[in-house]
Image: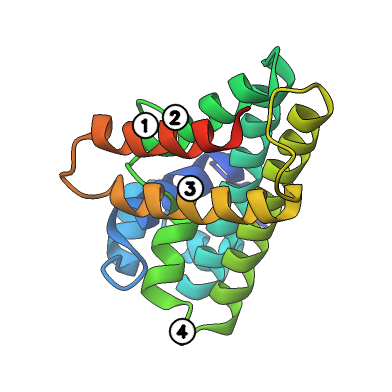
């Protein structure tokens, strides 16, 4: 007779996601995951597969959650500049209960050169972020907030690279105020 799962999948996946986000893939052991997720090793394997498969699922979960939060930021913004400011601040400061930086950026730096699956997921995530920036920039150009001297695609590419750098540096001891100053300059360069 099959046993009933004694856990909610997304809740324990969120725990794994945060642990990978904090420690990285290589430093996180299966024992760490079992203890942090609060489930039995057999349940982990039966539900999520091996460590690599769990990691890829954690990356997907991260992307889904972040995209939802970013969509909410854009929807709640009155102007394109406000949306850009809030998104960049989110990249720097994150949420209070989340590790610093970004799971996608951390994973790309740690693994993308030798893991095609991680490279693919990180690249896809960066592409989605760039498209979001492009949409916001087009909005700002249409309503006269943002500079028309450059194509929205070029400006989005610039902001995306700045955002990736900010998320990587958010993991260091550099004061967040310094990162915010850099972000503010990047946004100011886009405004009229």
Q: Residue furthest bottom?
A: 114
Q: Are marks 3 and 1 in contact (CB under 8 Å)?
A: no
Q: Is residue 127 left or right of residue 5?
A: right
Q: Is residue 163 left or right of residue 36?
A: right
The tag earlier along the polypeptide, 3 or 2, is 2
Separation (CA) of disc 2 from disc 4 = 28 Å
Q: Which residue is mark 2?
A: 89
The tag earlier along the polypeptide, 4 or 1, is 1
Q: Are marks 1 and 2 in contact (CB under 8 Å)?
A: yes
Q: Which residue is mark 1?
A: 93
Residue pictured at 34% horizontal, 68% vertical: 30
Q: Which residue is mark 4?
A: 113
Tell me: residue 139, above or below residue 152: above
Circle number at residue 163? 3
Q: Nearer the viewer, mark 1 or mark 2?
A: 2
Residue pictured at 65% horizontal, 49% vertical: 156
The local secondary structure at tag 2 comes to helix
Tell me: residue 162, above or below residue 114: above
Q: Nearer the viewer, mark 3 or mark 4?
A: 3
Q: Which percent across, then down, holds residue 99?
A: 33, 41
The tag earlier along the polypeptide, 2 or 4, is 2
Residue pictured at 46% horizontal, 87% vertical: 114
Separation (CA) of disc 3 from disc 4 = 20 Å
Residues packed near mark 3 inside 10 Å, few (<14), some (14 to 19) or many (20 plus) = many
Of 174 and 54, nearer the camera is 174
- Quarter of the picture containing the N terminus is bottom right
């Amino acid at each position: 007779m099959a046993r009933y799962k004694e856990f909610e999948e997304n809740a324990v996946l969120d725990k794994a996601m945060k642990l990978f986000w904090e420690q990285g893939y290589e430093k996180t052991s299966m024992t760490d995951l079992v203890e942090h997720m609060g489930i039995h090793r057999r349940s982990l394997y039966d539900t999520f597969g091996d460590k690599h498969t769990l990691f890829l699922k954690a990356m997907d979960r991260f992307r889904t959650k972040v995209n939802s939060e970013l969509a909410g930021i854009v929807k709640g913004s009155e102007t394109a500049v406000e949306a850009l400011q809030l998104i960049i601040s989110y990249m720097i400061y994150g949420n209070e209960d989340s590790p610093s930086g970004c799971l996608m950026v951390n994973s790309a730096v740690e693994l993308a050169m030798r893991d095609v699956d991680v490279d693919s997921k990180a690249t896809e995530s960066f592409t989605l972020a760039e498209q979001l920036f492009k949409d916001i920039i087009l909005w700002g150009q249409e309503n006269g907030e943002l500079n028309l001297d450059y194509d929205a695609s070029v400006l989005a590419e610039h902001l995306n690279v700045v955002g990736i750098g900010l998320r990587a540096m958010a993991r260091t001891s550099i004061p967040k105020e310094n990162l915010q100053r850099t972000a503010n300059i990047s946004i100011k360069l886009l405004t009229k």
